[in-house]
Image: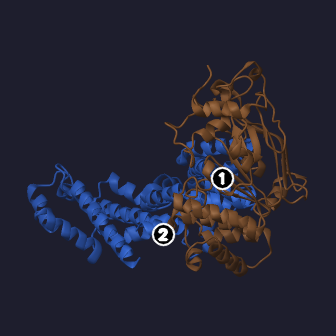
Chain colours: A brown, B blue
Amino acid sequence: MPTDKPLLVVENLCVSFLTEGGVVPAVSGVSFSLEQREILGVVGESGSGKSQTLLAIMGLISSPNAVVTGSVRFLGRELLGLKRRALDAIRGRQIAMIFQDPMTALTPVHTIGDQIIEQIRAHERVSRAIARKRAVDLLDAVGLPSPESAVDRYPHQLSGGMRQRAVIAMALSCNPALLIADEPTTALDVTVQAQILELIGRLRDEFGSAVILVTHDLGVVAEVADRVLVMYAGRVVEEGGKGQLFREPLHPYAWGLFGSIPPMHGPRPARLTAIPGSPPKLSQMPQGCAFGPRCTFRHQACIAQPSLGGAGGHRSACFLPQDGRQDLRRTLAAGAVPA
Amino acid sequence: MLTALVSRLGQMVLVMFGISVVAFLIFFATPGADPSARIAGRNASQETLAQVRHDFGLDRPLPVQYALMMERLFVSRDLASFVNRGQKVVPTVLEAIPITLSLVFGAAVFWVLGGLVVGVVAGATRGTWLDRTLMILSLVGVSIPVFWLGEVANLVTQSRWHDSWLFSWVPPLGYIPLTEDPWGWFKALVIPWFTLATLYIGLYGRVLRASIIETMQEDFIRTARAKGIGERRVLLHHGLRTSLVAFVTMFGLDFGALVGGGALLTEVVFGLQGVGKLTYGALQTLDLPMILATVIYASFFVVMANFIVDVAFVFIDPRVRDAH
């Protein structure tokens, strides 16, 4: 891993929404950092604050009822509270974003070529012809068949996979140092998913981009990520290298997540374990550890809010003693749950 | 594309045929609507009535009557008014058309520009005092009756302050042909234009604001913002362009209806002898040939405006282009 200063440092990021029912926290105190050329996977259920975290980083939370606090530093520069003009000089050029639903992410009345050219010309002083040539090359690079004609097509004339490729081509058009992908494969067929993931992996190799990849699909994370962030109810509950986290997850929530995937090796379990209950409503967050009500190992200490702790870059937010956690995990997996 | 155009034109002809048949039946074949009685005048003898019926072909079967009427409207164009004997219907309508077209075209320019500005500014500044002020103003504009506004404008510009420097340029009420005196044409119409456009500026501004606000919540707007292209470009290039559907649809309907005679109140207030006023007069005297001519004329413009709107959609929205 490069030892340069980190590309992105997020500290104590909070996003909350003022609603009629009071203040609803969507993201609470999220902190992480990202190195150059690193691929960070962010996993969590729907509503765990993944997307809101990304949107906050990009300054894309436009709701007048949203309150965003904390710090997001990109190459040492604070992004939160930046003026629109300064932010626009970074967005699209140095940080690009791929959105979840390719069907609605492109403006329906402009050709994909025009939309890519628009982004290139917003950031670089190049002629339309040169920008167009680059758009064709980009579409070719992301594997869109016959890019010469595809460049003049409207979004509705392309399939979902092709649209997502077009969105990715657009995101890559200015060689961003950081690519933020919000569930880029969720809306796609499995075969297309694999191709898109391969493409994202290639990005780092060819363009040297760092990637934040948000997903609720652990398979996707296993495929491409270097490091993983597990989010639950607006907080980071576990953070670690992919190997560490998949081998020895530390947080009971992560145990539940991994327990719900059919294992590839070893004896076949009688049935897959599911996490009991459902995620808390953001407007009615339980006191202390948000996972507490669903946790088999809940105890006295869980009344308080646990903070991220641990050694060797593998940290979790849980009060269980570090030693012996893996034993607890195995009892959970075996189904012998203590009362 | 060409076949679509031809089939569309065919549809238009069919619609107009249908309208002409219905209009004809209403005025000539409903029980009690005896045209010969109207032509012959009150207390005419039975002989006179029979004579009139024969002269006008009213004693022949309905389809023949219809064909005769259409022949005299479109081919020989010698259909005469039942009320003002000797007044040919077709030239009278043709004389009124430029007046109405001038009035509605000019007003349309004002209301499209005004509606765009009000809608875009209010949509972009949603929730601010500017937005609220614009919305209140446009509500006022929608609520003011056009004849009242016209009369007030006349009162101010023709009488009270006509001798002041402010309104001394305003010519007396009436129409000045564009071909005779373009500047005079403009001066005579600019106040009627504003009067007619006021309602529509308010209406279109409100509709456009609503659809811009809706569009600005879309995912593709977020994508556009993420590209770093500046909010103005996001709003105009991505937001406005996709918000125009309702605006254009309404424009087609309103424009067609106004050219077809809907601008009657404005025409009356400003002494413009347009199609609306012609229709109104014909209806008052139950001048059947004139009514028939103006109804068919109006239907032509409504159908035509709808056609133009459909063509406009092809340019605005590429999805419509492929739907055919």
Chain of residue at mark 1 = A
Task: Tell me if mark 2 has few (under 14), some (14-19) or many (20+) residues whose alpha carbon lies within 10 angstroms of its own.
Answer: some
**In the rendered image, which residue does mark 2 sit on?**
B98
Q: Is residue B262 visible?
A: yes
Left or right position of A167 against A30: left
Give the secondary structure at mark 1: helix
The residue lying at 58 percent from left, 61 percent from top is A194
Query: For the residues carrying marks 2 and 1, which lies nearer the camera in this image?
Result: 1
> Which residue corresponds to mark 1?
A222
Residue type at mark 2 is Pro
**Image position of A283 with respect to B215: above or below:** above
Tell me what residue is drawn at x 74 percent, y 23 percent: A302
Q: Which of the 4 image quadrants contains residue A274?
A: top right
Q: What x and y, as percent, mark residue B120?
A: 66, 54
Which quadrant would the C terminus of chain A be assigned to in this image? Answer: top right
The residue lying at 72 percent from left, 69 percent from top is A173
Q: Measure the C-alpha gap from mark 2 to mark 1.
A: 73 Å
